[in-house]
Amino acid sequence: MHWWRRGLCTNYRKIKLILTEEQELVRKSAREFASKHLDPGAIKRDDNAEFPHQEVKMMGDLGYMGIMVPEEWDGAGMDTICYSLIIEEISRIDASAGVIVSVNNSLVCQIFVNYGNDYQKEAFLKGLATGDLLGAFSLSEPQSGSDASNMKTVAEKDGSHYILNGTKNWVTNGVNSDLVIVMAVTDQSKGYKGISAFIVPKNLDGILLGKKEDKLGIRSSDTCEIHFDNCRVPIENLISQEGEGYRIALNTLDGGRIGISSQALGIAQAALDKSRSYAKERKQFGSAIVDFGAIKDKISSMGTNIEASRLLIHNAAKLKDMHKPFTKEAAMAKSFSSQTAMDAATDCVQIFGGYGYMQDYGVERLMRDAKITQIYEGTTEIQNMIIARELLED
Ligand code: CAA
């Protein structure tokens, strides 16, 4: 094992958290899994934009694909802090695997847990929770990203089916998923109150996958456009009721933002771990570069922002588990932790200097992977708008 990778393992004791014994165990086993099974192929998978099929299967066996799903639906029945810890540890090694797991858990399984009926849970949730099925979530469209309710995809009722027409884009897991949660307009006269949510198995006729996107980062997770052309979706695949889709999407995204914050945190933690190992070993002007104040400043601000991110994320997770409002807290966690990831990864490349710019060290990958955490599941600008709205309301 290379010495800069070894640094990842020895630094474990430096993370001091107030966790229960169970949460501590979950964290430890996720760390061991990621080091043993995700680390070896991560750089190659990223390079080849190769989906981690085998690794996703293993994560399914460990319960990581249905972390918060109750055991009665074949999930792991863990809390949201455990979910965050697992996503952090996976993303610390492989942020692409982090988003695959995060989307399946918080944007797909959670919709079934919170809004699905028994038939839908039996037919889909059990498979999603065990990793036998992979899920995707589609809200964005070419003309509507942040302005999510301005969607054009329509679902017209026709007897026992809805006929779906339109295009969704930026769909994470879009290529490899078995089913997609699709938000579509069922009543154009009602604005966002006319949006509904559907379970759309990918084997239905009338589904055409657009090209797989060639991305800057998280390259081994797949992202694509999906076109619906008179796709007939059985009426029993409507989630909750007509008109509930937008509320379901936004409520679900609150939880998703805890997942993406945890992914960002994992990237930032990896940047700190690699930076401290390298700075202690690398000698310039006759001493280790960690002895220079400029490097110490970078390490200390990385560490402080990482701890602040972790506290914000765990606070949002705890509120969610207590069934208290957590929209603002999840937005704060995402806004702050994604900036932390970007800053930490950039500083890490700077500390490594020329070596950091080269692919072999896995440091430039952190910088490329960090950027998306400021964009998907609501941009930083949208998170800050949500925070300001709540702080300013009377
Ligand atoms: N939870 C539940 N309901 C909510 C909510 C929340 N967090 N936020 C708002 N709502 C409800 C409101 O109560 C309101 O309903 P009522 O009238 O019945 O009260 C309704 O939704 C509309 O609310 P707003 O007027 O506040 O909505 P808005 O249109 O102004 O939008 C927004 C608010 C925050 C900008 C929202 O559109 C948003 O979050 N945009 C970003 C979308 C996003 O994150 N997209 C990412 C897609 S997924 C992805 O990235 C790809 C992937 O695969 C990972």
Image (cartoon, grey):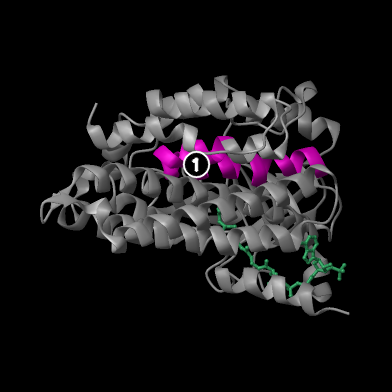
- On screen, residue 344 versus residue 116, left or right, reads left
Return the residue nearer the eye: 247 or 272.
Answer: 272
Furthest toward the left, the residue is 285
Q: In which quarter of the image is the N terminus?
A: top left
- On screen, residue 131 versus residue 290, left or right, reads right
Around disc 1, counting alpha carbons within 10 Å, would you say few (fewer than 14), some (14 to 19), or many (20 or more)?
Answer: many
Q: Is residue 329 visible to the viewer in this orientation of the structure? A: yes
The quadrant of the picture showing ligand 1 is: bottom right
> Could you tell me which residue is drawn at 82 percent across and 31 percent down?
119
Q: In which quarter of the image is residue 135?
A: top right
Extent of the magenta region: 86-115
Q: Is residue 368 visible to the viewer in this orientation of the structure? A: no
Q: Quadrant of the C terminus?
A: bottom right
Return the residue nearer the eye: 193 or 278.
Answer: 278
Return the residue nearer the eye: 179 or 375.
Answer: 375
Q: Does residue 90 show up magenta in the picture?
A: yes
Is 127 rendered above or below residue 379?
above
Classified by dominant secondary structure, the portion drawn in magenta counts as: helix
- Does any atom of ligand 1 lie closer than 8 Å to the CB of label 1? no
Q: Does residue 146 show up magenta in the picture?
A: no
Q: Name the residue under label 1.
A: 98
Can you give x and y, in whole percent of width and height, for residue 343 in the image? Answer: 41, 62
> Could you tell me which residue is drawn at 65 percent across and 34 percent down?
82
Can you give x and y, in whole percent of width and height, for residue 295 in the image? Answer: 30, 58
Can you give x and y, in whole percent of width and height, for residue 283 in the image? Answer: 15, 48
Q: Quadrant of residue 199?
A: top right
Can you give x and y, in whole percent of width and height, for residue 222 in the image? Answer: 43, 46
Q: What residue type is labelled 1?
A: Gly
> Could you tell me which residue is drawn at 83 percent across and 56 percent down?
325
Check disc 1 and report its element: helix, strand or loop. Answer: helix
Furthest toward the top, the residue is 61
Return the residue nearer the eye: 151 or 2.
Answer: 2
